[in-house]
Image (cartoon, rainbow, N blue to C red):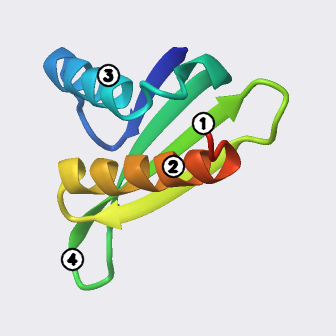
Amino acid sequence: MQLTIYSQNLTITGQLKEFFARKVRAIFTKTQEKIRKITINFTSEESPKGVKTILCKVQVVLFGLPSILAVCKHQNMHKASALALSSASLALEKQFPQS
């Protein structure tokens, strides 16, 4: 399973990338043999009222099946990633109910 982390308008340190890598490995432990690649993309957005939010997109590319895309927006980067990763994990569990 290959993991790629991108960011736009944000700075993600090496420690933060390692944190997300550990989190991804923990969440997708049971289904990792079915996953080819996981891409996490963080984007910082600002609303017209000046509120900054983080958009987290998680794309899970599977072997021989359509990809799963989970998107979540939150003011906290950790919360946005947790929600998007859990959403992707639930979608993957629905696709492979016996895993």
Marks 2/4 in contact by CB < 8 Å: the verdict is no
Marks 3/4 in contact by CB < 8 Å: the verdict is no
Tell me the number on the disc at residue 88.
2
Element at badge 2? helix
Question: In the rendered image, which residue does mark 1 sit on?
Answer: 60
Q: Position of residue 85 (x, y in %)?
A: 40, 46
Q: In the figure, residue 45 lies in which quadrant?
A: bottom left
- The amino acid sitting under disc 1 is Val
Q: Earlier in the sequence, mark 3 or mark 4?
A: 3
Question: In the rendered image, which residue does mark 3 sit on?
Answer: 21
Marks 1/3 in contact by CB < 8 Å: the verdict is no
Q: Nearer the viewer, residue 50 or 30?
A: 30
Question: In the rendered image, which residue does mark 4 sit on?
Answer: 50
Q: Residues within 10 Å of mark 4 (few under 14, many from 20)?
A: few
Q: Earlier in the sequence, mark 4 or mark 1?
A: 4
Q: Nearer the viewer, residue 45 or 72?
A: 72
Q: Position of residue 28 (x, y in %)?
A: 44, 31
